[in-house]
């Protein structure tokens, strides 16, 4: 097997460096917000320099947008990979809901980034051409499932994929974003492992109950 060319090695090094910067920047922005995050701190925690970060991304705002693109693209990629076409519409929706539940729980930085970007009224997200193209992948699978459910007479005729997406997202984001205030007020940790399957099942049933209500 031929050894990689010097150019291929250099490209791999660039890709690794860029990925390393994005990983550290994700934690920095999630922990401190867009305003509080410092490029100097990101550089200090990576194997590169502030100058190199500007070379790769152009500036702090562009780096933050790249972090958002990476975070949103990850969940969209998972949604596209899951195969639910062979399942009954109800089971397909339960599986998609469970996928979002699992992803959000495993990626609390994503929830923090979403909350931070909402504070900024999505002014950074709106600048991204990448993120603008992620709406269709998010809704495409849901649309096909709902069409199958309506055709079989199982789902309400006015079922809207964006509404279903909102129900799933609302439940999963609330559980992470409001974990500590909810626990302080009500004395219940929504991430208690003992309640995990209960909440995971509850989400699927909420979606199905809405779609089958007459």
Image: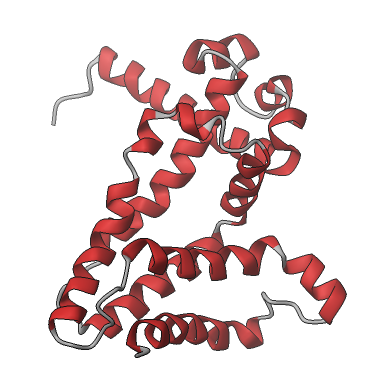
Front-lying residue, 126 or 62: 126
Residue at the image position 28 percent from the left and 51 percent from the top: 137
- Residue 84 visible here: no
Does residue 43 lie above or below 23 as drawn?
above
Image coords of residue 117 (percent x, y): 61, 40
Residue at the image position 61 percent from the left and 38 percent from the top: 121
Extreme-right residue of the structure: 184
**With 17 as the anchor, is 34 left or right in this view?**
right
Residue at the image position 61 percent from the left and 56 percent from the top: 108
Image coords of residue 80 (percent x, y): 27, 57
Front-lying residue, 150 or 186: 150
Residue at the image position 41 percent from the left and 88 percent from the top: 209
Front-lying residue, 92 or 165: 165
Image coords of residue 165 (percent x, y): 41, 64
Image coords of residue 161 (percent x, y): 32, 64
Q: Find residue 156 and report its image quarter.
A: bottom left
Tell me which colouring the rendered structure shows: secondary structure
Does residue 150 lie above or below 107 as drawn?
below
**With 193 as the anchor, is 143 left or right in this view?**
left
- Residue 169 visible here: yes
Please give the count of numbered marks on the rendered protein: 0
What quarter of the picture does the N terminus occupy?
top left
What quarter of the picture does the C terminus occupy?
bottom left
């Amino acid at each position: 097997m031929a050894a990689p060319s010097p150019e291929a090695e250099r490209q791999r090094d660039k890709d690794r460096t860029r990925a390393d910067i994005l990983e550290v920047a994700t934690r920095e922005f999630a922990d401190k917000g867009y305003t509080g995050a410092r490029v100097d701190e990101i550089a200090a925690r990576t194997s590169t320099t502030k100058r190199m970060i500007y070379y790769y991304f152009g500036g702090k705002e562009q780096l933050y947008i790249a972090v958002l693109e990476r975070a949103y693209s990850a969940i969209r990629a998972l949604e596209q990979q899951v195969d639910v076409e062979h399942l009954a519409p109800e089971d397909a929706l339960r599986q998609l809901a469970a996928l979002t539940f699992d992803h959000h729980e495993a990626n609390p930085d994503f929830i923090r980034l979403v909350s931070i970007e909402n504070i900024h009224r999505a002014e950074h997200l709106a600048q991204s051409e990448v993120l603008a193209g992620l709406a269709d992948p998010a809704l495409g699978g849901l649309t096909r499932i709902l069409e199958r459910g309506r055709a079989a007479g199982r789902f309400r005729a006015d079922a809207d994929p964006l509404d279903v997406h909102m129900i799933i997202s609302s439940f999963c984001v609330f559980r992470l974003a409001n974990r500590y205030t909810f626990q302080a007020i009500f004395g219940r940790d929504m991430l208690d492992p003992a309640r995990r399957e209960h909440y995971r099942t509850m989400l699927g049933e909420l979606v199905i109950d809405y779609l089958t209500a007459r």
